Amino acid sequence: MPLPKIDLPTYDFTIPSTGKVIKVRPFTVKEEKLLLMAIESKIASDIISTVKQVINNCVQDDEVDVDKLPFFDIDYMFIFLRAKSVGETAAVNLTCNNKLENGETCGHNFVTDVDVGNVELVRFEGVSDDIKLGPASGVRMRYPNYSIMRKIEELPDIDKKTHIIVSSIDYIYDKSGMHSHKDYTTDELKEFVEGLTEENYKKLEGYVDRFPTINGKISADCPKCGFHHDVRYTEFYDFFI
Ligand SMILES: [Zn+2]
């Protein structure tokens, strides 16, 4: 006789970009192991595929396509599931940056607990996805998905911004009509973006610089010098290790 399967609990999760409430279940022990292995490997493609696979397993709603969601939805869901699965707190390493009276930095390394369940998605006001570049021309922007954003993070800094802009173009329009990103190669879109004036480039840059971001807060006192730290963090994968 096969062993019984123990039901996993489910939770309501609100998808930040759409406000839709879906059912999710926590990670299993096996999934936690897979995530740990992928994150420890530091290989971006492994992390991306494992995070996506595990999140797909945890989402109990067939209509949700993780590849269609903006990257910050996945990041936020990952933190939510991590908090429900592993625990609301995680240990992080901090280095004290207090300047001492002798001019040196304290530099003491210490471990502190972070409340992972207490993160927030910060949105900027007044960001339009319709960016006018001329009297009858412009670009309609959209948020890149998780795979694209994670891959861009592996690029050298000098290439990052333009790649994020290119990946955020939904379509370009002018008097002749709409030109969907789907019909052009990345190189063609890159050429378009790099062929813009500084002023127009800055408009596109303004959109991607104001993507919603996930923020957490750490408050901790250095055990050596007593200096109080208020740190904002945006890197969450470290919590697994
Ligand atoms: Zn210190």
Image (cartoon, rainbow, N blue to C red):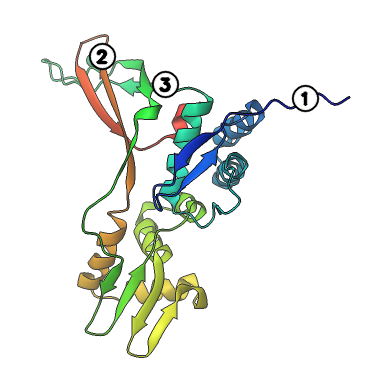
Residue 46 appears left or right of 160? right
Q: Earlier in the sequence, mark 1 or mark 3?
A: 1
Q: Amino acid at mark 1?
A: Pro
Considering the numbered disc 2 on the image, is that residue within a helix, a strand or a loop? loop
Q: Rate crowding at label 3 as few (under 14), some (14 to 19) or many (20 or more) other CA atoms within 10 Å.
A: some
SS class, disc 3: strand
Specify the amino acid type for callout 2: Cys
Q: Is mark 3 within 8 Å of ligand 1?
A: no
Residue under the point 40% across and 28% down:
116
Residue 60 showing in the rendered view: yes
Ligand 1: does it lie within 8 Å of the C-beta at label 1? no
Q: Is residue 240 visible?
A: no
Q: Which mark is residue 4?
A: 1
Q: Is residue 222 left or right of residue 68?
A: left
The spot of residue 158 in percent (x, y) is 35, 57
Q: What is the spatial separation of the Cα atoms under label 1 and label 3, in whole angstroms?
A: 31 Å
Left or right: 222 with respect to 240? Answer: left
Depth check, mark 2 against mark 1: the one in front is 1
